[in-house]
Amino acid sequence: MNTDPRRGLPSVDRLLRALEGRAPGLPGWALREGARRALAAARSALEAGGPPGDPEAQALALAGELARPRPIRVVNASGVVLHTNLGRAVLAPEVAEQVAAAASAYTALELDLASGERGERGAEIATLLRLLSGAEDALAVNNAAGAVLLAVSALARGREVIVSRGELVEIGGSFRIPEILGAAGVTLVEVGTTNRTHRRDYEAALGPRTGAILKVHRSNFALSGFVAEVELPELVALGRQHGVPVVEDLGSATLVDLRAHGLPPESFAPARLESGVDLVCFSGDKLLGGPQAGIVLGRAEPVAALRRSPLARALRLDKLTLAALDATLRVLLAGRAHELPTLRQLLEAPERVAERAAALASLLRKSAPPGLAITLEPTRAPVGGGSLPGFELASTAVALAGAAGAEPLARALRAASVPVIGRVVGERLLLDARTLLPGDEDAIEAAVAGLELDGARDIR
Ligand SMILES: *Cc1c(COP(=O)(O)O)cnc(C)c1O
């Protein structure tokens, strides 16, 4: 007799029949996939010598999970304005409207309406970027990684690109300067040391095979102590002397001057152009406050070379992103930068954030389960998204504490129908008010009201 316990598990079809009528709102494809995954999990559990669990309940939970449209809306209560895991910049409502309009209609994406001939996609994006930055020419592609790839490939393919060892950075796991240069078909020539790079290091590396000098912003860390680097104007002078283009990967930058608000000087992209640098590349969805995109500003000739590259076609913007970027740039041109959620959150006065945190705490106290301690706490959070290393924003959070500790609270709030993403600090879960969007308070209230506190009895 076969005693393999896996034989006791139902088939997918039998499990589906058992679920009939129990999940009226769930689509059939999600139920089938949920059932398949639940049975696979039960089989693995049995193989490991454990109990099979409850495949029916698991199938329903998995199907419910699969049936949610992606990406899942969450509340960013982390205090990190540009959270890469949460999709970085949020678009302004009027920007989102322009995207929706472009999505559901035909558009003159590549049609010149005056002549009826084929037009250039994104031609006006270049105009808007020029007007905002003073650059001779501009280009927008899929993301900043793509912009850097395109720039070095178009200017230096088959030749050498010189980079300081202090700038061979990794951003967000998969963007690594040496690997991007490899993918672009150029040879990386490292100069200087981790902490100090001098003009003479670049000079020694410049030669007949040099295709470009690349300067990279250390977006997500800071070097301090015994350090030296060659600033952009000096690199540009050096490049001129040797007839070599200079490209800057700035990472995160704005097109409005926020230096008076304490942002570091290099965060204002137009000021970088004053050095005469050939190209500056940065992200659309970091400090700029728009959609994912890679912005290239620079001199006419190198930008034209990028446009001609075959890679430009592979990295081009889709029409939805183009609509979002166009609308974002128009908000900036109209002098309404504070209407972009990223810039509004970045610039909101700490006192105002504290008021919103206090209002949220009062709201939560009304409906929170007993045993949940709700207090206010001052916080500091980085801007995130590889922006402004070392720069922190003062803010206020609603701190939640329960007898079972902060991790279970964080997990429960992530499991809410609108997940709430806070920050665990010691025994408290902090919900930072700085990064909340209009309407988020209601979602937080619902999530907190639904908490089932383990160990609540121990407190009372
Ligand atoms: C963020 C960043 C990138 C990558 O930007 P994406 O738009 O995410 O591709 C590249 N370089 C630097 C220096 C960055 O900070």
Image (tube, rainbow, N blue to C red):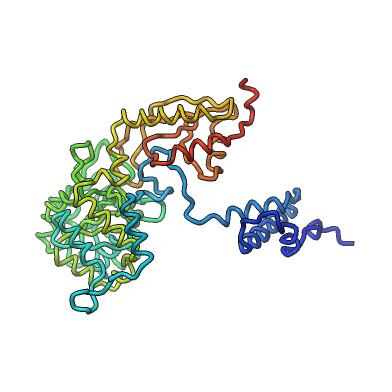
Pick whichever, 436 or 44, lies toward us: 436
Vertical placement of 212 versus 258: above or below?
below
Q: Where residue 14 appears, x then y in whole percent? A: 76, 62
Q: Is residue 189 visible?
A: yes
Q: Is residue 246 visible?
A: no
Indicate the position of residue 353 as horizontal and vertical percent values. 34, 32
User: Which quadrant of the rendered structure holds the N terminus?
Assistant: bottom right
- How many marks can you see? 0
Q: Residue at x 54, y 54 (%)?
A: 68
- Give percent across and percent down for residue 96: 35, 54
User: Can you say which quadrant of the picture contains the C terminus?
Assistant: top right
Q: Is residue 22 left or right of residue 328?
A: right
- Of residue 258 and residue 47, the one placed in the foreground of this image is 258
Q: Quadrant of residue 352?
A: top left
Please identify the residue farthest to the top as the structure is shown: 460
Q: Is residue 215 above or below residue 262?
A: below
x 38%, y 30%: residue: 396
- Residue 225, located in which quarter of the rendered image? top left
Residue at 13% in and 61% down: 136
